[in-house]
Amino acid sequence: MTITGTSLAGADVTIGGVPATGVTVNPGCTQITALTPAGVAGAATVTVTTPSGGTASLPAAFTYTNPIHPTS
């Protein structure tokens, strides 16, 4: 997943309350890339927290879907 904003250096990301992994911030501190943690099907809130204590949450910003399994 990719998140765009400002002053994102050192930010933490949670999706549905579960920490994302592999969180990296670009050199300009304006974009975060992160690996989405496992979750149950449905909408999940994405929250970004910076070291200075700034927090932003967006309800239903990510939607988990059930996996599609190929049939043989």
Image: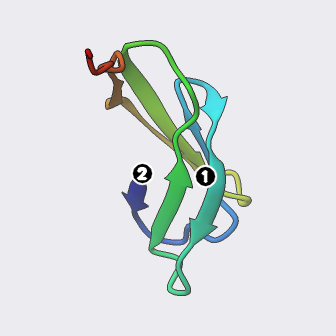
The residue sitting at the bottom extreme is 27
For the point 50% across and 63% down, which residue is it?
32
Of residues 38 and 31, the one nearer the viewer is 38
Q: Dot 2 corresponds to which residue? A: 1
Tell me residue 4's x, y (percent).
38, 63
Contact (CB < 8 A) between labels 1 and 2?
no
Q: Which residue ends up furthest to the front in the rendered image?
A: 72
Amino acid found under the numbered disc labelled 2? Met
Residue name at image x 57 percent, y 71 percent: 25
Indicate the secondary structure of the residue bearing disc 1.
loop
Q: State the scheme by which the image is colored.
A: rainbow
For residue 66, what is the image quadrant?
top left
Question: Residue 34: which quarter of the image?
Answer: bottom right
Would you call the spot at circle 1 few (<14 residues within 10 Å), some (14-19), or many (20 or more)? few
Residue in the foreground of this view, choosing between 53 and 69 = 69
Residue 62's disc number: none
**CA distance separating discs 1 and 2:** 20 Å
Q: Residue at x 62, y 58 (%)?
A: 23
- Vertical placement of residue 46 versus 44, above or below: below
Location of residue 47 in the rendering, given as x and y in whole percent from the top left corner: 52, 39
Question: Label 2: few (<14), some or many (≥20) within 10 Å?
Answer: few
Q: Is residue 17 left or right of residue 28?
A: right
Element carrying mark 2: loop
1 vs 2, front mark: 2
**Reading the chain from its start, which is encountered first: label 1 or label 2?**
2
Amino acid of disc 1: Gly
**Quarter that holds the C terminus:** top left
Q: Residue at x 50, y 85 (%)?
A: 28
Residue with the mark numbered 1: 54
